[in-house]
Image: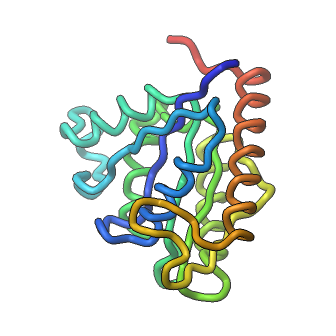
Amino acid sequence: MTVHKVGYLIGSLSAASINRKLAKALIKLAPDNLEFHEIEIKDLPLYNHDLDDNYPAPAQALKHALADVDALLFVTPEYNRSIPGGLKNAIDWGSRPWGDNSFSRKPSAVIGASIGNIGTAVAQQQLRSVLGYCDSPQMNFPEGYIHFTEDLVTDDGEVTNDNTRAFLTDYLERYAEFVTRVRAVIPPDED
């Protein structure tokens, strides 16, 4: 069995984020062939084209972390019906400088939680558009719009609702299959 190293990015910068709780739950429910590593985005400065020739240390760390994984999972909230600014900033850093796009050919999926009834549907659609431009093959189904209610996921990542647990387990199994298929057909670029 091939184990895929998955980098996950949490769109919220908050330590108490419900999407951080969701990420913990996903890691606990994942099949054995997925190994998760968080890719931190909180220390990145705002992207500035003037720095393309001299990337700051946090941006260099991001580029290294993206290069070190086989696939990506974006776990994101929705802010004002859009992608959180910190997450978009990380994508801007990771896709630059021109010709050194760290998302190209990297299989990805998007999921997110919100206390609103439609979960993070609008932000996810916008994020998929950005990832498409960045040449990241995406798992488009199933979509994961999690309506987060109090105590849905405990602080240590246990899902308390049977239907949600079953959905997330299925989501991760399909994600593992997707990553395996994409990596078989589109091998990573070799330097």
Would you identify the image quadrant in which residue 186 lies? top right
Return the x and y of residue 95 as percentages of the image width and height.
Answer: 46, 42
Q: Which residue is drawn at 80% across and 56% down?
A: 141
Return the x and y of residue 55 as percentages of the image width and height.
Answer: 24, 36
Q: Residue at x 34, y 39 (%)?
A: 62
Q: Is residue 158 left or right of residue 65?
A: right
Would you identify the image quadrant in which residue 86 lies? bottom left
Q: Which residue is drawn at 40% across and 44% down?
A: 38
Count of marks overlaid on the render? 0
Residue 149, placed above or below residue 181: below
Q: Residue at x 73, y 28 (%)?
A: 180
Return the x and y of residue 185 as percentages of the image width and height.
Answer: 79, 23
Q: Nearer the viewer, residue 24 or 143?
A: 24
Residue 17, placed above or below residue 111: below
Q: Coloured how?
A: rainbow
Residue 60, placed above or below residue 114: above
Return the x and y of residue 77 as percentages of the image width and height.
Answer: 49, 71
Q: In this view, does 19 lie to the left or right of 44?
A: right
Q: Which of 122 and 175 is in front in this view?
A: 175
Residue 28, placed above or below residue 34: below
Q: In this view, does 29 lie to the left or right of 61?
A: right
| Quadrant of the snapshot with the N terminus | top right
Q: Is residue 162 left or right of residue 99?
A: right
In this view, the residue farthest toward the bottom is 117
